[in-house]
Structure formats: C-alpha cells, structure tokens
Image: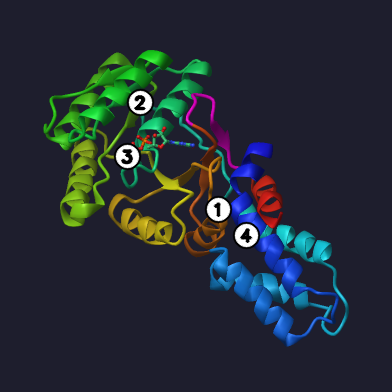
Amino acid sequence: FQRLKAGLSRSSNAISQGIASVFTKRKLDAETLEEFEDVLIQADLGLPAATAITAAIAKGRFDKEIEGDEVKTILAEEVAKILTPVAKPLVLDPALKPHVILVVGVNGTGKTTTIGKLSAKLRAEGRTVMLAAGDTFRAAAVEQLKIWGERTGAAVVSRAIGADAAGLAFDALKEAQAAGTEVLIIDTAGRLQNRAELMAELEKIIRVIKKQDPAAPHTVLMTLDATTGQNALSQVEIFGRTAGVTGLVMTKLDGTARGGILVAIAEKYRLPIHFIGVGEGVDDLEPFEAEDFARAIAG
Ligand code: GDP
C-alpha cells in the first residue's frame, strides 16, 4: 500500500492541494463545487466520475461548512464505488490445457515484464507455463521473454526475428496442447506507429489460434502504463475493439503515476482490472484492490 501510495502521489498531491485550495472554510456553494470538479478532471478522473463525485459531496451539504478531510473521505468512498465492481482476480480454468492468455498493449507499457511476473505467480502456484515470444520484431523483447522463462521455469517458444507472429502463436498452442501445459501466455507486438498493420496482426493471431482451439484466447490481458494519463483511454478503445480485451493490468504504479485515469477507464469501459505493477521485480505484480487504490488516490 505504501508503494502504491507513493506511486500515486503525483495524482493524490494534486488532488490534496486542489481540495485544500478549493475548500477554504467557506460554505459549500456552486462555485466551490465547480472548482472541485475541475480538480478531479485535471487529475484525469474523467467528466462522468468527476460529476458523480461532486454530486456526492454536494448531497445534504450545500450551504454548510465542509472540511477537506471530509471531502477526502467522500472522494475515497466514491472512487471505491466505481472501482469495486471492476476489481476482479484473474481466474484460470484448470480444465483447460492450456488456458490461453494473450497479452496486448502498446510497446513499453510492460507486457513482457508483466508476463514474467505472471509466470512466476503461476509457477509458484504449481502450474506449468509456456511463454510464446509473439513480439517477433524486437530482438530485445524475445531475449527478455527467454530470460523470464528461465527465471520462472517456464518453457519459451520463439522464432527468428521477423517471423510470422500468428504462425508462432499457432505452433506454441499446438506444443502446449501436446505437452499438457496448463497456461500458455502469448506476448504480442505493440507498435502503434503502424496501427493498421498492428491490428491486422493481432486479428490474425486470434483467428489462427481459434483454428486450433475455438474458445481461445480465453483471456486477453491488456497492459496500461500508469504514467501515460489520458492517452490510456484511446489505447483501451483501440485494443478493446481489435483484440477483445477481457481484463487490464495497470503497470508502473510505483513511479510517477497518474493513476486517476484508471477511474475514468473503469467508469467508461467497465473492464475487469486484475493486477497492478508496482516495480520491475518478479514479485512486483499485485492484485488490484479497489479500496486501497481509492484511499491512495484521495491522499
Ligand atoms: P513491453 O514493451 O510492453 O513488453 O514493455 P516491457 O515489459 O519491456 O517494459 C518496459 C519498461 O518498463 C521496462 O524497463 C520494464 O522494466 C519497465 N516496467 C514494466 N512494468 C513496470 C512496473 O510495474 N514498474 C516499473 N517501475 N517499471 C516497470
């Protein structure tokens, strides 16, 4: 919680300072509420959430004095209300061999690292894991995945740089099925510079996997970098449409995160948020806890 709180300090400091400057011991009036709503919008929470939270503050308190601490308590409660329905653990079907997890997201958002951490978690639970190095364009991504495979005791399927990612995913799934592997995690490319090509590649990977197992991928995890702010919304839009994202992981919540955007995303897309990344280490993947997050962001 302390690390999350520190990571979210950029958002929570801005909110705290905003609250301190807006609620200056005067009676709650329309102007105060409007200023408070602006503070929340500046902190990336999005207009619908900002409006709902402001309404909750106003309810029964209009024309009365209100303290900053009371505002923070209500803010935390309201953010928790938005986040609680989407805070869901990642559930894997043990009957599947393998349960296929496709991992998507813009390059640099933490796909490979998250796969490594997730592999470690699953291995610690005693499951067999195979990793497919589907980002076939970046030698570094393939190398990183191999290192994570070695570290966590997961088999890694890779091809030469530039090889067809869909073909690789197909082969990996066949291998995992033959070996009776419980979880197959497929890394993908995230070059947003060439959006059409990237989306075509993701669609092809999914199409090809389905030939081998019509229900796969069973999970499509998307990584979001908590330091990006507003841009994360359009990323969810694009990948959600193309890859059928089933759940989110917000990474880099340990750094100088702008976590407010997670509230806007939860409010708009209602996608499950499974994990948060709080560091580069193998143990730095934590379940997403709505109340902790809400308390940390409210300052
Ligand atoms: P990919 O391009 O999406 O596969 O992203 P990577 O997994 O290569 O991650 C990009 C960079 O972000 C690397 O330097 C990672 O170590 C770092 N990173 C990933 N997740 C986290 C996190 O939760 N916290 C911090 N501080 N760094 C992270």
- Which numbered disc covers residue 259? 1
Inter-mark Cα distance, 4 to 1: 14 Å
Principal secondary structure, stretch drawn in magenta = loop
- Which numbered disc covers residue 215? 3
Inter-mark Cα distance, 2 to 3: 11 Å
Q: In the depicted view, which residue is nearer to us: 24 or 287?
A: 24
Task: Please state which of the two labelled residues, at mark 4 or mark 2, is closer to the viewer.
Answer: 4
Residue 220 visible at all: yes
Point out the stretch of residues depicted in magenta: 280-288
Q: Is residue 282 above or below residue 219?
A: above
Which quadrant is the N terminus positioned in? Answer: top right
Q: In the depicted view, which residue is nearer to us: 178 or 237?
A: 237
- Residue 285 sits inside the magenta stretch: yes
The residue lying at 68 percent from left, 70 percent from top is 53
Nearer-N-terminus badge (4/2):
4
Give ligand 1's quarter of the image: top left
Task: Please state which of the two labelled residues, at mark 2 or mark 1, is closer to the viewer.
Answer: 1
Asked if ligand 1 lies within 8 A of label 1, the reply is no
- Which numbered disc covers residue 82? 4
Q: Residues within 10 Å of mark 1 (few under 14, many from 20)?
A: many
- Which numbered disc covers residue 294? none
